[in-house]
Amino acid sequence: MLQETAYVLNKLDWMSEQGIWPNGLRYLWTDAFGVILLVSLYDELGEERYLGKAEWVAAEVDRVLGRPRGIRIGEEPDRDGQYFHYLAMWLYALAALARHVPAYREKGIGLVKQVHRPFVIPGRGVNWKMKEDLSGPYPGYGLGALDAFDGYVSYRILDEKALANEIAEMRVLIDRTAHELTITQDLGLGMMLWMTHFFPEEDWALVQRRRCLAMLDRMWRKDGYFCREPYLPDTKFAFTNYGVSVGLQAAESMPDRVARLNRFFETYQSHDEYDRAAITHVMACSSHFPGLLIANHRARSALSHSPR
């Protein structure tokens, strides 16, 4: 696992100076990775300000995006509705905070109780996107291919006992789909690899780890990046490649390609909104320092820190 904290600290200073993050517009996916990053820095460096900043971001997410049930996708007008996989990533971030401030665990459990039933159709699947008030599926969207895996992992990391019923429902869905599921999108591959490393001996994880690594091998381009899909060899995104990097580091695979994609995207410009988007730069930090995204880092940090 990379531990390039100097890179991360410089990037955080630059983002703050530019009003990109954490002092920019709220976006739940980016904020989840950002909170995990800040708590990881606190664990690594022992400086209280990073934990304080993580709690500030969590409070801002509640203030800006929080709804009576669940959390809105983002602050901008076109970021309406709720994504289950964003909520699951936020639950993982709350679990990271709960390592030091136990109240965040109860907060996460409460969020699961708000969103699980509206999103999950027992025995069938998980709605990928819901209306903002969770009154029904968002028009034009169906079931998510990875969402049951997202919930299963985040629920177990958060509290296996309190969420036992919800975990069991997700496991039924996983067992129905894992052996047939073939992922071809870059970020989906990275996130699935990341999820498999928490429970590496479970059947679904063994199948998906092997399948994802084989697909990523097909999608590697000699210039130094993973293409978006196998049939889109010239299409690339920095933030999705950084997600692949996190997955590969979790799986302890292809370290040379992780290093090469980090170098490639450090100077790459897409000449669109992604060049300055918070999601690009926060995910870059996660690629250079996954921290608590990696299970063995979580275990090591647990030995050296106790809750407040």
Image: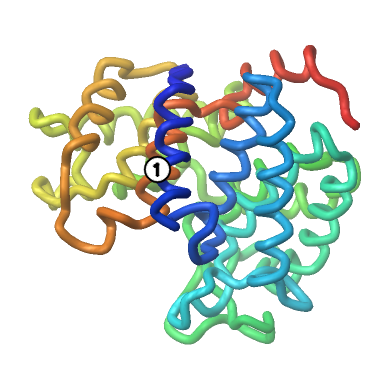
Tag 1 residue: 14
The answer to whether residue 212 is left or right of residue 233 is right
User: What percent of the width, then of the height, locates residue 112?
Assistant: 77, 59
Whether residue 208 appears in this view of the structure is no
Q: Is residue 21 above or below residue 291?
A: below
User: What percent of the width, then of the height, locates residue 195?
Assistant: 55, 36
Q: Is residue 26 above or below residue 22?
A: below
Q: If the image is split into quadrants, where does the C terminus sit?
A: top right
Whether residue 56 appears in this view of the structure is yes
The answer to whether residue 267 is left or right of residue 176 is left
Question: What is the secondary structure assignment of the residue under circle 1?
Answer: helix
Q: Badge 1: few (under 14), some or many (20 or more) residues near its Cα, within 10 Å? A: some
Colour scheme of the rendered structure: rainbow
- Nearest the eye: 94 or 118: 94
Residue type of the residue flagged with mark 1? Trp
Residue at (77% x, 19% y) in the render: 302
Instruction: Count up the numbered dots.
Output: 1
Residue at (62% x, 81% y) in the render: 132
Q: Quadrant of residue 282?
A: top left
Residue at (74% x, 31% y) in the render: 48
Q: Is residue 275 above or below residue 34?
A: below
User: What percent of the width, then of the height, locates residue 182?
Assistant: 36, 45
Q: Quadrant of residue 59?
A: bottom right
User: What percent of the width, then of the height, locates residue 111?
Assistant: 78, 61
The answer to whether residue 270 is left or right of residue 106 is left
Residue at (57% x, 36% y) in the render: 37
- Nearest the eye: 20 or 113: 20
